[in-house]
Image: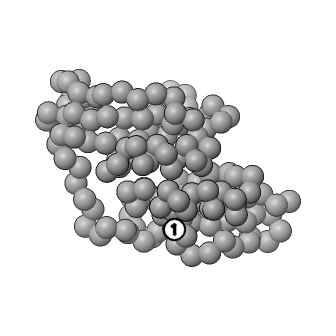
Amino acid sequence: MTVQRMDNVAIVVDDLDAAVAFFTELGLELEGRAQVEGIWADRTVGLDGVRSEIAMMRTPDGHSKLELSKYHNPVAVVAEQENPPPNTLGLHRVMFAVDDIDDTIARLRPHGAELLGEVAQYESIFRLCYLRGPSGIIVALAEQIS
């Protein structure tokens, strides 16, 4: 048996509306929002009394999804380091291909995006950058130039 597909990547956020606005500005589409609670949720995630709200974001091509989750109960746990560096163990970052990296950064700045370094060029193929988005999420952007 093999994997059929990767369905989505889930990220826990502290402000769901801000995260939805950020990823909408990036170009993802809000597929829907829902409340998640009940014994099935408790059993699935291994926590008691789960009550959360999720927003499912879809890439324009329809192939990838990002699930943004806001936990109301139990309250989300803050990582030991508030803004861990890119070499921290665990989920590293989410990368998106964009048409215009400079325009994308400019549109995301009002939503709190901050560059971790700078826009760099890899040979004559890509322009790349890492930025920090809502809830400390590291988002990578790649603009193909050749």
At horizontal 46% and vertical 27% (from top left) the residue drawn is 32
View extreme (left): residue: 48
Choose between 74 and 48: the one closer to the eye: 74
Residue 72 % position (x, y): 22, 40
Name the image quarter holding the C terminus: bottom right
Residue at figure coordinates x 42%, y 49% from the top left: 18
What residue is drawn where x is 77% and y is 57%?
144
The mark total stands at: 1
Against 36, residue 19 (above or below) is below
Q: Looking at the picture, how far across and down is residue 57, in whole percent?
A: 51, 36
> Does dot 1 land on a helix, a strand or a loop?
strand
Q: Kindly give the residue lying farthest to the front in the view shown.
A: 110
Horizontal placement of 146 versus 136: left or right?
Answer: right
Q: Where is residue 125 in the image (x, y as percent from the top left)?
A: 80, 63
- Left/right placement of residue 119 relative to residue 20 reads right
Res. 82 in view: yes
The spot of residue 143 in percent (x, y) is 73, 58
The way the protein has been coloured in the rendering is one colour
At a point 55% along the width and 43% down the height, the residue shown is: 24
Where residue 42 sits, quadrant-wise, is top left
Q: Which amino acid does label 1 sit on?
A: Glu
Query: Label 1 belongs to which residue?
Result: 114
